[in-house]
Image (cartoon, helix red, strand yellow):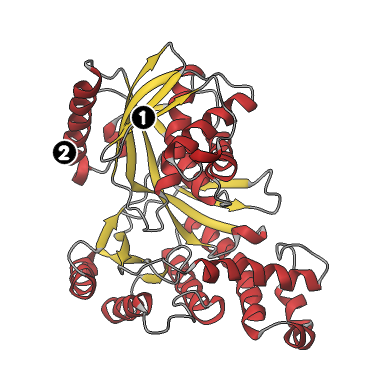
Amino acid sequence: MPVHTLEEIYTPDVLTMQQHRYADAMNEFAKLYGCEPTRIFSAPGRTEVGGNHTDHNHGKVLAAGVSLDVIAMVIPTEDGIIEVKSAGFPADKVDTSDLSVIAGEEGTSAALIRGVAAGFAKNGHSIGGFKAYTTSNVLKGSGLSSSAAFEVLIGNILNGLYNEHSVSPVEIAQISQYAENVYFGKPSGLMDQMASSVGGFITIDFADPAKPVIEEINFDLASAGFNLCIVDTKGSHADLTPEYAAIPQEMKAVAGFFGREVLGDITKEQLLEALPALREKFSDRAVLRALHFAEENLRVEVEKQALASGDLPAFLDTVKRSGRSSYMYLQNVFAASDPAHQGLSVALFIAEDVLQGEGAYRVHGGGFAGTIQAFVPDSRLEAFKSAMENAFGEGSCYVLSIRPFGGTEVKKC
């Protein structure tokens, strides 16, 4: 079903707040454009649950859409101009008669809008103009991927206004990645866009990146008595680009030993058999990162089966194993170039101390700075949130839920 109600999208505890949020956005739209919006759309942020640094080497990931989202109040127009005013930012205007890559737009929201429109046109879909006012509560720099949510939102608007919702969520995700890669200038993988577009728990196998295999998993985390918490340790990502870039570079260098470009189809057994030669040729860190990749791929399968069968203890145990592997072998919990700052390590210690063997916790996303992820039982949520905010400040612990839908049109109240 391409259109969902607020009651279907949001949990009861936040429904009243969301109703006020949507009403405020409608009022802002009316102030801007002098009329009421005729259509409403929403796209969620996402969380990576399993598969830490696997997608760029054609591995597997487990991801999920979350309860934070970007929403848009919209009216279609006949002039072919897309105008998007996001709360707190100047309006972007894109003329859909010119869908070429514009160098001066690289790194801007306008580039994403133009890129999504270009992707729709390139794939043979209809496009047109519209005016939109958007507001987002997807935390920037949190690993929840606010940019992917924005791209998926634009795709859903074009899909709803001009294509009768005929473009699939998977294709919208692929178009969104195209916009980010080609127009925005960021060589991102497909996980962020796919999780935002499809929603719920999903696994993605990137063995063939042009044809990723997506499986949806029906599991209600809240009904099981658990909360998804994202903790912002307030670390800076500045000057960490070399740290991030080294991970795929080192993994691909090890793959080259086997005559492959990526680690996707190289097994742990092959790595262990070649261990003496690999250590002779590469750094131990590169070898350990390759071993992390091989086992992390297997963990995604275990997590998928655990959720599908309702085996929560097995799922949580595997999440913790993933987190330990990221810490010890992938080595992305703090930057070797900046050992003085280890906010993620501090957060992981607090999580272990408060949870006392219950739940699970791990680095979230790219690592080195930013956020951790934790699955916290209801009975320990208050203590967990209090301890994290004592360490990192008020508002640093975000209690989220898994959203059952990805990008969607929202039925007007």
Residue ID at (26%, 43%): 11
**Residue corresponding to mark 1:** 84
Residue ID at (70%, 54%): 207
Image coordinates for residue 6, horizontal then vertical, percent: 27, 33
- Residue toward you, 374 or 36: 36
Q: Is residue 136 left or right of residue 302?
A: left
Q: Earlier in the sequence, mark 1 or mark 2?
A: 2
Which amino acid type is shown beneath numbered disc 1? Val
Q: Is residue 283 left or right of residue 18?
A: right
Q: Is residue 199 visible?
A: no
Q: Is residue 86 left or right of residue 298?
A: left
**Residue corresponding to mark 2:** 16
Distance from the alpha carbon under mark 1 to that under mark 2: 26 Å
In this view, 108 is above or below 320: above
Image coordinates for residue 327, horizontal then vertical, percent: 48, 78
Which amino acid type is shown beneath numbered disc 2? Thr
Q: Is residue 394 left or right of residue 138?
A: left
The local crowd at label 1, few if under 14, some if 14 to 19, many if 20 or more residues have their Cα within 10 Å, is many
Q: Is residue 389 visible?
A: yes
Extreme right residue here? 259
The local crowd at label 2, few if under 14, some if 14 to 19, many if 20 or more residues have their Cα within 10 Å, is some
Residue ID at (79%, 64%): 260
Image coordinates for residue 171, horizontal then vertical, percent: 58, 34
Q: Which quadrant would the N terminus be assigned to in this image? A: top left
- Residue toward you, 332 or 272: 332
- Residue toward you, 333 or 320: 333
Image coordinates for residue 252, horizontal then vertical, percent: 70, 67
Extreme front residue here? 104
